[in-house]
Amino acid sequence: MSELVSFKCPSCGSPLKYSAEKRRFSCEYCGGDFDFETVQNADVNADTEFDWGDYKENVPNETLEGTVSYVCKSCGAEIVTDATTAASLCPYCGSTIVMEENVSGMIKPNGIIPFRVDKKQLKDIVANYCRGHRLLPKNFITEQRIEKIQGMYVPFWLYDCHADGSMGFNGTRVRTWSDARYHYTETSYYYVDCEGEMSFSQVPVDGSFRMGDPLMDSLEPFDFKDIQEFAYGYLSGFVADRFDQDADTCLPRATARIKSSVATAFTQSVRGYYATLSPGRSHIGLDQTKVNYVLLPVYFITTSFNGEKYEYAVNGQTGKMVGQLPVDPRRSLRYTLGIAAGVAAAALALATFVL
């Protein structure tokens, strides 16, 4: 059985809160400011690093006391955090969420990328993202709404593997020349065979069914050099989703990404030597597959307009924002009419000038 770790202030013993802006832990009671090494208890959970093979055998017995679970009555999402953090809005649908009893089943990840983007930066990111969109509904994403948003750590599987294989291509080369009477074109046909091997490290696939894969993919890249050893103190002020798609379930998606990368590398190695190039047979095999479980920082913004739900995500490490902005039909109509009126006025002025 694992126990929740609460970092205490070295000065006064009060609970510490992690600051994404400072990348440090701070004490709201005495104002103390500390780095991770200062507050870390090196002996806590030192032997509970996640291993997928062991976890599959022992998952019914996994228990983590001291965390609280919040459940959304609208979409059914369940998130967890430390006992000192209060959550109010569901990151997925924006509805009010309610606290449930202590939850079991959360396991310690291999690592975590802490939030680097704070609420002030988030406001600026959203403002810049919306800037210049004249047809955006007024007050579509308000500062008040951003203030209520809690950053969420999303569960990801990171796959390492070795790939080798071969791929064939049908290619052509074209040569042209002319003499005094004719213009000649010679087309040569080739079959190109490529073989090779590649190693892949930390190929990410989110482990949450509710996460839209295109949305998560577009948030990349994350800088995995920033992965820290997991500590529960990083959850302070944030929430975490628990994976509902295990490493075996997500492996086919990782495999598809890896094979696509290998095929792209093969194609790029021969592209440029031929006028046309079309892929033929391919055989790509993977082995030495390993997986790690990590939590990655994401802000979710969910809002609605004209009965449709719009979802946005902000990479909590890099600040990259993704999502499609709506168009207000009334603003669009006014904008179109304004352009039409401007064109008509210009045409009338030109006609008057000509006359």
Image (cartoon, helix red, strand yellow):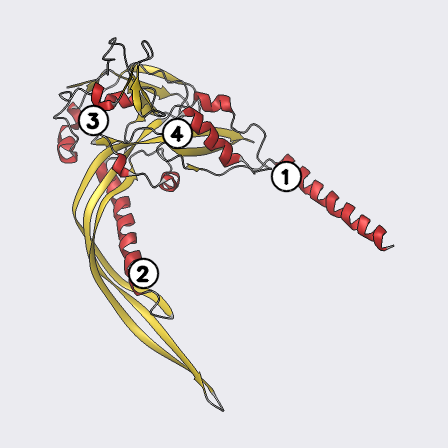
Pick the residue in front: 332 or 26: 26
Q: What residue type is labelled 2?
A: Gln
Pick the residue in front: 46 or 41: 41
Alpha carbon separation for disc pair 2 and 3: 40 Å
Task: Give the residue pinned by disc 1.
Answer: 332
Say above or below: 94 vs 273. above
Q: Residue at x 30, y 23 (%)?
A: 24
Q: What residue type is labelled 4?
A: Tyr
Q: Residue at x 80, y 52 (%)?
A: 350
Alpha carbon separation for disc pair 4 and 3: 21 Å
At numbered mark 2, what does the secondary structure look like: helix, strand or loop? helix
Q: What residue type is labelled 1?
A: Ser
Alpha carbon separation for disc pair 1 and 2: 43 Å
At numbered mark 1, what does the secondary structure look like: helix, strand or loop? helix
Q: Which comes before the other along the chain, label 4 or label 1?
A: 4
Q: Residue at x 40, y 18 (%)?
A: 88
* Label pair 4/3, CB-CB below 8 angstroms: no
Alpha carbon separation for disc pair 3 and 1: 50 Å
Pick the quarter of the image with the C terminus. bottom right
| Relative image position of residue 244 (x, y in whole percent) | 28, 31
Q: Which comes before the other along the chain, label 4 or label 3?
A: 3
| Relative image position of residue 125 (x, y in whole percent) | 46, 32
Task: Give the residue pinned by disc 3.
Answer: 108
Say above or below: 51 vs 101. below
Q: Which comes before the other along the chain, label 1 or label 2?
A: 2
Task: Give the residue pinned by disc 4.
Answer: 299
Task: Give the residue pinned by disc 2.
Answer: 268
Alpha carbon separation for disc pair 2 and 4: 36 Å
For disc 1, the neighbor class at 10 Å (few under 14, some 14 to 19, many from 20) is: some
Pick the quarter of the image with the N terminus. top left
Say above or below: 79 vs 173. above
